[in-house]
Image: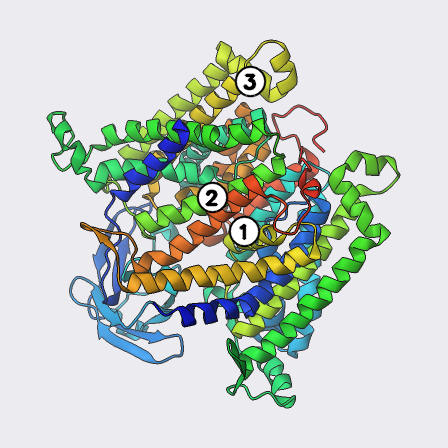
Amino acid sequence: MDWTLIIENSLKGLVGINAVYFAVAAIGMNVQYGYTGLLNFGQAGFMACGAYGLGMTAHYFHIPMWWGIPLGVLFSVLLGLLMGIPTLRLRADYLAIVTIAAAEIIRLVVRSVRFKAYFGGSDGINNFSETFRKVGTDLGIRQSAEYGFWPFRFTGRELWTLTIGWCVVALFGFIVYQLMKSPWGRVLKAIREDEDAVRSLGKNVYSYKMQSLILGGVIGTFSGMIFALDRGSVQPDNYSRDVTFYILTALVLGGVAKVSGSIIGPMLFWGLFTFVDNFMRQIAENPIRIGNFMILQSTQIGQLNYMLIGLALILLMVFRPQGLVGNRKEMAFDGR
Amino acid sequence: MLSLVFLSAFGLVFAFMSSPAHGADFALRIQVKEQFRDANGKADNQPVAGVSISVTDATGVEIGAAETDETGVVVIPVPEKADYTITLDESTLPEGAALDPGSPAVQTVTEDSFVTDTRIVVFFTGQSQSESQTFFERLSQRILDGVRLGLVLAMCAVGLSLIFGTTGLTNFAHGEVVTFGGLVVFVFNMAGLSFLGFLSFLPGVSEQGTFHILWAAPIGVAFGGLFGWALNAAIFSRLRRRGVGLVTQMVLTVGLSILLRNFFLSRFGGRTRPYREFTLQRSWEIGPASITPRDAVVSLLSLVILVSVAVVLRYTRLGKATRAVSDNPDLASATGIDSERVIRLVWIIGGALAAIGGVFRGLDEQVSFDMGGRLLFLMFAGITLGGLGSAFGALTGGFVVGIMVEVASLAVPTELKATPALLVLILVLLFRPQGILGKAQRVG
């Protein structure tokens, strides 16, 4: 068993690109779930808006890539309105149902043969991220060179995405932190605790919820963009329902209704995930057998990892729904 | 505690299933078939020989190329599980044959889709017969298909809606309860539970411990009910006692859904598989539409079950108590109804009905690890349309959504046929959030 490798990979997992795009998406989800009590199960749909906003500039509109940023934001505002208008006056469950459905429909539409001309079908879209890479190269980062020190060694390509990614995390973390300290943020928290009380103070609850949903969604859009730029491609199946759920798990792991929690959570999530994954893969190289029954096969590790995520989410909700750094009192709200 | 034991026992039952084949050799098994579909879309497929197939990896490097043999199959070994692109050379197709529009000449497989070491890719040539049908024929066929889907949806959705009505919980793991039913039946039907071989004196039970579907299905339904009971007893009743918020419980069901789905995937594999008695049958022509005897029997049975559920809810003491708890749990308790008992029964009945839905869906479309998860969204659309929390609403809503989704596939591409369900969801919530059968009341 090569512990050095396991630890090295896990530490890299803490700060790697997966943690970055999860963190950005989790900051967005935290605005909705943690601060406002809105259950958005369609964050993957917002991420797809960002990714396809970037991808479509090259694939369909043939305009410079940077236009993808306003385009993605526009898409996600529209999506937020579509999800929010019918549901935000109703009980919390309706939003959950509509968001989960809308995100799934988005995935089906972008991977469909019918709309291949716009979204590239199930192959997705490639070759749009050169502009982004070129900025890095112009700044003197050699794409294939290696940078860093043990255990944080990254190629220039990774380093460039990571730098931008963590800047985005810091930016949105700061914005959300400031917003939640403002009177606007206090209204959101009050809505989470008691909607009727806020309404009786003359606040337009519906409008505040809509702003929260859209703000969280737009932040999620940037997460999708970072992911697409890192991969250099947009694949419809990267925006499935499960991605939202994993981000939710990461958020709950870190801590709900705390900006720090929404950043620590994804880091821990990917650190632990990489650790468990590497650990099991090393075990599977020398499989344990009991009679004819194999305890662990390398083909099952993927599913086992995801089972552990599900189990972690269950245990967290039972024993610590506020997450590591959250405040239990802030997670006592009831959707009914 | 007993319930926890039961939950682990379920795990053990699945552990007895043959796990996916393993070994160092990975391959793509590519089949080219000429389809002769009847109006029902189910009939014979003929192999197409001598078609050139090439496989390239994600970077565009060619891994292998070959021609299909007389069984229409070509197996191309690949070095590892990864993303591959499979290209069919359309110029090598036989004279007059063309690929079905739904089966493009270039297909991609992803690393994740390799659940076993061999990934099967199928190309279809030929046209489905629908081109030559009149609009009326296609419409009636779709309506008939829609009725079948609607019956399954209604059955699955009743539990979801009743659980919501009595406890306020939206159970995002309900799709997995459906899958559970379908898979338990598969285990009894196909896996060969050798420790049950002593039952082979019964008709339809083999010495290897495989059960005829007529045995396996009721067993699966019983397991579904037990599963519902165990979920409630092990998790949700405890949470209710501790006063855990509904949103927290809802997020927990999401975790449960991830856990179960991946568990099913790891034990069952990613393929769709038929039950033993799943055979292609000659369709009965009913006017302009056609239905296989199997589907007809399944539909009739569903109808009988659904009507009995409705009768039970309408006329028995239990049904009245259930509706009373749905209506107003506090008031129901005050009138002496043991609401915990009602909730327990609702979980059991909901689990059993979901399992029936899973079995019927499995007979219709074969079984897979996410068969229920894919229905979940349609179930939600159904219960929202019918009125969240109302059992009759779930019955009608599920039924209507099923028909609508199938009929919509006349107008929208099949791959997008679920889209109208979202539209219904949004329109209902905008204009009649209490649903067609719900009472007009504040739901906000």
Residues at marks 2 and 3, common chain?
yes
Q: Marks 2 and 1: in contact by CB < 8 Å?
A: yes
> Residue A88: where, in percent of width, then height?
71, 42
> Residue A52: where, in percent of width, then height?
59, 66
Answer above or below: position of A231 versus B164.
below
Determine if residue B405 is in view: no
Instruction: Using a 10 Å C-alpha cutoff, classify the residue at mark 2 as few (fewer than 14 neighbours), some (14 to 19) or many (20 or more).
Output: many
> Residue A71: where, in percent of width, then height?
68, 67
Mark linked to residue B329:
none
Chain of the residue under the numbered disc 2 shown in the image: B
- Return the residue at label 1: A245
Q: Residue at x 68, y 38 (%)?
A: A332
Answer above or below: position of A24 versus B323.
below
Chain of the residue under the numbered disc 1 shown in the image: A
- Return the residue at label 2: B257
Q: Amino acid at mark 3?
A: Ser
Mark linked to residue B339:
3
> Residue B383: where, in percent of width, then height?
55, 33
Residues at marks 1 and 2, common chain?
no
